[in-house]
Image (cartoon, rainbow, N blue to C red):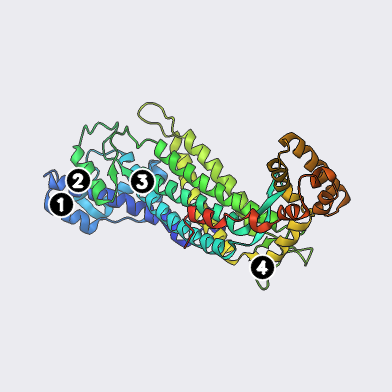
Amino acid sequence: MIDRYTRPEIGAVWSDEHKYGAWLAVEIAACEAHAKLGNIPMDALAKIKEKASFNVSRILSIEEETKHDVIAFLTNVAEYVGEESRYIHIGMTSSDVLDTALAIQMKDAGNILLRGLIKFKENVARRAKEFKYAICVGRTHGIHAEPTTFGLKLALWYQETVRNITRLERAIESISFGKISGAVGTFEHLPPTVEESVCKSLGLKPAPISTQIIQRDRHGEYLTTIAIIGSSLEKFATEIRHLQKTEVLEAEEYFSAGQKGSSAMPHKRNPITCERVAGLARVLRGNAIAGMENISLWHERDITHSSVERVIIPDSTILLDYMLDRFTNVVEKLIVYPERMKENLRITHGLVFSQSVLLALVAKGMSREDAYKIVQRDAMNGWQSKKDFSDILKQDPDVTHHLTAEEIDGCFDTAHAVRYVDYIFERCGLSN
């Protein structure tokens, strides 16, 4: 991933230094397991642990000749260890190292993402409570529908984020499996106890069954989960992008001192972070599709997945980490305009209360079909004339025959429209 979107902590997880360090940890753990079984002399193990190291530049240089990254790595480690290096990699295949180490990296990256997601959730919760009762118009199809509150919008984000945390925890658990089972997963040249010991020491679980590789449905789940979380962030960002439109302007991204919105138009304040989040979510979904393509491999393994994973797994985790950090900042500093929300709620002159009038007429004994026809007729009159909807209703004998002026006014009560806000917040776990 380009430096622009790479934050240091998660970038370090995918560095060559960290990758080869994970490979070495797998190899040493396997040597320790073999030593317990008497397959490696204890003094040889001690020397391996003391001397084993690597040099990234040297590995890459050797790989230029061998065209095999694990052989290049083992050759370089042997240069440090010496004679005892013959005990390293006993009975193992390259993917025993690669897949087990990759699980370590994916688990580490996943835990960084989890922390970021929890931080995001906490910020959304705080802002939801802040604007719990801020009345605004709800929109369906982009058209004014009925009143809601800005706090309810954020409460919905909060609940979706709670679900995403559960998804990510499950995906981390699903990927936290290693394998040290040999060329086709049969343990032909080493016992299962080696795998069990290695996985335990590295904080993983042994895959119940594997071929030459850990099965890629696990990686597909991980990448799909990242894509879902990214899509949620895009959804939230898209809402802010609409609300920041000049003609709406109910909320907007914080615009810092010295920030510039356009090279041509000095007045511009653009939702650039939200647009960036929306764009990067597309990359995550594309990577998830590639991850699912990797599930189907030939027989006990081919390497069509390998080159793909070198790109999509690091890039997806790095991008989501960046998106979470940037969008958490957007939410934390989001500028909200409650008075503008009230103004926008009034621009239809009360048409958003049409259902309340409809139900009031039905409650008085009118058929739903007749009530709908009358209310729609008066609503369209109000839309075209820009007159107050309640005044039009009060002048319609088909309405006043059933409803008093006071009853009509009661249909336009915003407090009644959002009277269950507390109840919804409690169901969302936002009551405190």
Which residue lies under the disc numbered 4? 255
Tell which circle, 3 or 4, labels the residue nearer the N-terminal end.
Answer: 3
Q: Tell me: 21 left or right of 146.
A: left
Q: Which mark is residue 173?
A: 3
Q: Position of residue 74 (x, y in %)?
A: 30, 47
Amino acid at the residue labelled 4: Phe
Tell which circle, 1 or 2, labels the residue nearer the N-terminal end.
Answer: 1
The secondary structure type at the circle numbered 1 is: helix
Q: Position of residue 124 (x, y in %)?
A: 53, 60
The reply to whether discs 3 and 4 touch (Cβ–Cβ < 8 Å) is: no
Which is more toward the observer, 88 or 23?
23
Q: CA distance from mark 4 to mark 2?
A: 60 Å
Q: Tell me: 312 left or right of 25.
A: right
Which residue lies under the disc numbered 1? 44
Q: CA distance from mark 3 to mark 1?
A: 35 Å
Which residue lies under the disc numbered 2? 87
